[in-house]
Image (spheres, rainbow, N blue to C red):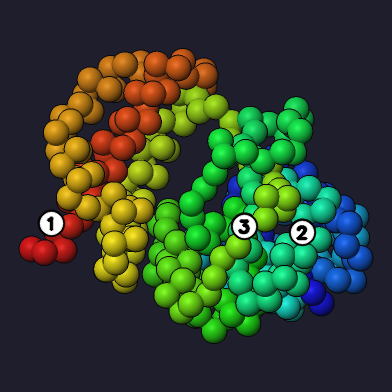
Amino acid sequence: MKATIQICTYNRAHLLGRVLDACFEQTVCASEYEIVLVNDGSTDETPAVIASAQARATCTFTVVNQPNGGLAKARNSGLARSTGERIILIDDDVLPLPNFVEEHLRSHAAHPEAIVRGAAINVENFDDLPIPLWSLRNYSGNYFWTTNVSVPLARLRAAGGFNESFAEYGWEDIDVGLRLRFAGVKAVFNRRAIVYHYKPPPRASDVEKMLRQARAQARTAVQLARLHPHWRTYLATGDNPVQRFLHAWTRGAARRLRSQIGSLEDDRPLTGRELRAARRLASEVYFEELERVRRAGTA
């Protein structure tokens, strides 16, 4: 088996069927790759979507069902069931092109021991897709971004897989990337290994989730810095003197920003002004939580 596409899913039934169909419709021979899907305790219609997909699967399709335990634990469950020489990690909100696996394998043929970073094009829905031409507008500097990345399976296992202490949102893939980077694993970028990344416009009902994720991401950022006290970590997480100073300079804007967003009780789209305020508010609460956790850790 040359490759494993590994996906973890949680309550994305409305997207998962399309994602799986795209994974089934690859240009490489069906005997050359497999799909390993981890259902991390979904409570929506995900089991029915999976059952339907199993009936139309065109390649080996392994499903792992487990109680909700977070992305790092789910990734490790998928690693344990994977058999491909290369593991291609994607999320449950990305739609790969038909040549996706082929392009990852082409890069690995030229760079056998490397990480291969694929390209992602952000889209608001899966029904009106743009021409699949990647540009710097969708650039991500992440060394190991599980939206679209591959690596030799043995190399990832040797690095210890995913750290399951990252039980909350954020940074579990950055942790893996740092370990691989520090172990000397190089990364290459293939702009033709493309996925469409589902990024719908935030709505009023999404704001509180954005704030919860920002707080969780701050807590895991501190965790990441303790594991990797390195300038790359401090720059990525914002836990550095420059960004902390800029936050302190604008501190106290939360109440004013909330007033700019308006009611969060309905499911209406956010206006441009409200979206900018919501993103600034998420940044505000991120740095507030970052400081709180850092202070608690030194008390």
Indicate left or right for 264 with 258 as reference: right
Q: CA distance from mark 1 to mark 2?
A: 46 Å
Please name whichever residue, 241 or 5, is drawn nearer the observer in this view of the structure: 241
Badge 1 element: helix
Indicate left or right for 58 with 149 as reference: right
What mark, if any, has residue 189 been given in the picture?
3
Classify mark 3: residues with Cα within 10 Å, few (<14), some (14-19) or many (20+): some
Identify the residue under disc 1: 295
Q: Residue at x 14, y 33 (%)?
A: 249
Q: Specify which label sits upstream in the sequence, 3 or 2.
A: 2
Badge 3 element: strand
Q: Quadrant of the C terminus?
A: bottom left
Name the image quarter holding residue 7.
Answer: bottom right
> Is residue 31 positioned above or below 99 on the image?
below
Please identify, in this view, whether the residue under mark 1 or under mark 3 is nearer the observer. Answer: 3
Identify the residue under disc 2: 103
Q: Specify which label sits upstream in the sequence, 1 or 3.
A: 3
Q: Amino acid at mark 3?
A: Phe
Instruction: Name the residue furthest left.
Output: 299
